[in-house]
C-alpha cells in the first residue's frame, strides 16, 4: 500500500528502462516525489481536490519552479530548451484556452485530425471558439496536444466534462496513441473505475506524497 | 512681450478664489483641493523659475546634467506609481526609468547636437525644456504601456501558459499582449499629432507666439517637438515593453506572476 516507487527501480511490470523519471521532485506542498514511468505505461494519480495533483503535473511540464529533477530518456529537463521539453512532455490542463477566432486557427493546417474518433464532425473546425461547449473544447484540446506528438502525456482530468459515451471514445484515443507512439501517460482522475480501466499503476496522493494502490490489474 | 506683474497674477488668483468659495459650499473637499493645488502651482513654478535662472547663469555641463538627472528620477517614480500591478522591488522603478533614460536622453542629445547645434550643445535654455517635454510625454506612453502589459498578462495568465504547454516560446506566448501594450502606449501621441493645429493649439507653440515669435517659426519648432516626442515615446515604449515582457518569464520560460505586486 505504501511502497513508493523510486526513480532508480525499473518498472516491475514491463521491466523496461523508464521514459519519464521524477527524482525527488518537490514543490512547497508536494513531495519529494520519485516516480518512474516506462514507455507505453499509464500511471493514474487520484486524490482530493487541493492535494496537489495539478501542481505535480505543472512541475513535470516545468511550468513552476521546483526542486529535484525530471528526466526524459535519462536527459534532465534543464538540458532541453523549455519549448522543446513542453512539446515532448505535453500537459493537458483541466481547462483549455482558445485565443484565436476559429478552432482551425489553433491547429497546423494539413494535419489529419481524428475528429470522428472523439465524436466530433469536421465542420467544428470552422466554428468560432466562443460557440464551443466545454466538452467539445476538452476533446479538441486533447487533439491539439496530440498533434504535437509528445512522448509523455500529462492528462489532468481529460474526461471531466464528458458523458460516458465520449469518455469511452477519449479513453480509446489515448490508449491508441499510447500504443502507437509508445508514450508514457500520467493520468489524473477522480474516478476510481476509470483509473482501474486505463492504468497500469494507480497512486493516491495524500499529504503531497504518492501512495501506490493495489487495485491495478 | 508683455511682462506680467505680481498684481496681474493676483487678479487671476481672485478667479480661483471665487471658484473655491463657490465649490466650498457644494463640496468642502473639492474646495480644499483646489486651493492646495493652486498654491502648489505657484510655489513649484516659482521654484523651478529660480532654479532655471541660476542654471542659465551657470551653464556648465555638470549643472545641466545634474538637473537632467533629477528630472529623470522624478519622472521614473511617476511612471512607477501609475502602474497598478507593477514589478516587485527595484524592478518596478528600474524598467520605466531605464526606458525613459534610453529614449528621452538619446533623442534630446540627438536634437541638441545634430538639429539645433547651439554652442555649447548643452545650453540649458534649449536642453532643459526639450528634455522636460520629452520626459513628460514618454512618461505617459511608458506608464500606459507597462500598466497594460502587466494587467493583461495577469488576466490572461491561463492563455499564456496554455501556449507555453503547447511548446511556444515565451516571446511567442506573450506576443499578442506585447503588441496591445505597445499600441496603447503610442496611441496618445499619434492622436496628438493628428489633432495638432486642428483641434488643439499645442502649448509650446502658443507660448512662443505669446513671447513674440513669428507664427511660422513657432510652428517649425512645434513640428520638431512633435517628431521628437513621437520618436522618444515610441522608442521608450518599445524598450519598456521588451524588457518588461521578458521579465515576466524566468530562465526556463515559466510565467512568473509572483514578480508582480498585488493590486493595492
Image (cartoon, coloured by chain):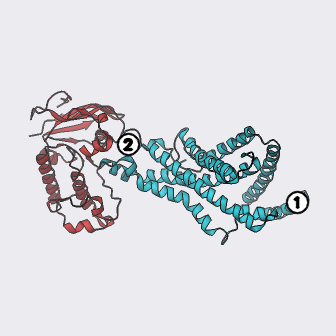
Kindly indicate whether the residue at mark 2 contacts the one at mark 1 (C-beta within 8 angstroms). Answer: no
Residue A188 lies, in percent from the top left, at: 23, 45
Residue A107 lies, in percent from the top left, at: 26, 58
Residue at 34%, 64% in the rendered image:
A101
Eyeballing the image, is A50 above or below B135? above
Q: Colour of chain A?
A: red
Q: Colour of chain B?
A: cyan
Residue at 70%, 61% in the rendered image:
B221
Secondary structure type for disc 1: loop
Residue B56 lies, in percent from the top left, at: 80, 46
Q: Is residue B38 visible from the viewing direction of this image?
A: yes
Q: Nearer the viewer, residue B29 or B49?
A: B49
Residue at 72%, 46% in the rendered image:
B121
Mark 2 sits on what residue?
B254
On screen, residue A158 versus residue B103, left or right, reads left
Give the number of the disc on residue B4: 1
Q: Nearer the viewer, residue B71 or A214?
A: B71
Of the residues under marks 1 and 2, which one precedes in the sequence?
1
Residue occupying the far bottom of the picture? B198
Residue B200 lies, in percent from the top left, at: 68, 69
Amino acid at each position: 500500500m505504501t511502497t513508493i516507487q523510486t526513480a532508480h527501480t525499473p518498472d516491475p511490470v514491463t521491466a523496461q528502462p523508464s521514459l519519464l523519471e521524477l527524482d525527488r521532485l518537490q514543490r512547497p506542498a508536494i513531495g519529494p516525489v520519485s516516480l518512474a514511468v516506462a514507455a507505453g505505461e499509464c500511471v493514474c494519480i487520484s486524490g482530493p481536490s487541493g492535494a496537489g495533483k495539478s501542481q505535480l503535473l505543472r512541475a513535470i511540464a516545468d511550468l513552476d519552479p521546483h526542486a529535484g529533477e525530471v528526466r526524459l530518456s535519462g536527459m534532465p529537463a534543464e538540458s532541453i530548451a523549455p519549448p522543446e521539453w513542453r512539446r515532448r512532455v505535453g500537459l493537458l490542463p483541466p481547462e483549455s484556452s482558445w485565443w484565436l477566432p476559429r478552432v482551425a486557427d489553433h491547429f497546423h493546417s494539413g494535419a489529419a485530425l481524428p475528429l470522428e474518433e472523439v465524436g466530433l464532425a469536421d465542420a467544428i473546425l470552422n466554428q468560432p471558439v466562443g460557440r464551443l461547449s466545454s466538452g467539445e473544447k476538452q476533446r479538441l484540446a486533447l487533439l491539439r496536444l496530440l498533434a504535437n506528438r509528445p512522448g509523455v502525456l500529462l492528462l489532468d482530468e481529460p474526461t471531466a466534462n464528458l458523458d460516458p459515451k465520449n469518455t469511452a471514445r477519449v479513453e480509446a484515443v489515448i490508449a491508441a496513441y499510447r500504443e502507437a507512439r509508445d508514450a508514457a501517460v500520467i493520468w489524473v482522475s477522480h474516478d476510481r473505475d476509470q483509473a482501474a480501466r486505463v492504468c497500469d499503476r494507480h497512486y493516491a496522493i495524500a499529504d503531497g506524497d504518492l501512495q501506490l494502490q493495489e487495485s491495478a490489474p | 512681450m508683455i511682462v506680467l506683474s505680481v498684481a496681474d497674477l493676483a487678479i487671476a488668483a481672485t478667479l480661483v478664489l471665487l471658484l473655491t468659495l463657490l465649490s466650498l459650499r457644494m463640496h468642502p473637499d473639492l474646495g480644499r483641493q483646489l486651493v492646495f493645488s493652486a498654491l502648489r502651482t505657484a510655489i513649484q513654478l516659482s521654484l523651478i523659475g529660480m532654479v532655471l535662472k541660476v542654471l542659465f547663469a551657470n551653464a556648465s555641463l555638470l549643472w545641466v546634467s545634474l538637473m537632467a538627472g533629477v528630472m529623470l528620477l522624478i519622472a521614473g517614480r511617476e511612471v512607477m506609481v501609475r502602474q497598478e500591478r507593477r514589478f516587485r522591488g527595484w524592478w518596478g522603478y528600474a524598467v520605466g526609468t531605464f526606458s525613459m533614460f534610453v529614449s528621452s536622453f538619446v533623442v534630446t542629445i540627438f536634437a541638441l547636437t545634430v538639429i539645433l547645434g547651439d554652442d555649447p550643445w548643452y545650453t540649458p535654455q534649449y536642453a532643459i525644456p526639450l528634455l522636460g517635454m520629452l520626459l513628460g510625454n514618454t512618461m505617459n506612453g511608458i506608464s500606459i504601456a507597462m500598466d497594460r502589459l502587466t494587467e493583461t498578462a495577469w488576466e490572461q495568465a491561463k492563455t499564456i501558459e496554455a501556449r507555453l504547454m503547447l511548446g511556444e516560446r515565451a516571446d511567442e506566448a506573450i506576443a499578442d499582449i506585447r503588441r496591445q501594450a505597445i499600441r496603447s502606449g503610442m496611441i496618445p501621441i499619434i492622436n496628438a499629432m493628428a489633432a495638432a493645429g486642428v483641434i488643439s493649439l499645442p502649448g509650446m507653440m502658443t507660448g512662443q507666439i505669446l513671447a513674440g515669435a513669428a507664427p511660422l517659426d513657432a510652428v517649425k519648432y512645434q513640428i520638431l517637438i512633435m517628431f521628437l516626442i513621437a520618436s522618444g515615446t515610441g522608442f521608450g515604449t518599445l524598450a519598456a515593453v521588451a524588457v518588461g515582457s521578458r521579465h515576466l518569464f524566468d530562465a526556463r520560460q515559466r510565467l512568473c506572476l509572483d514578480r508582480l505586486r498585488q493590486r493595492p
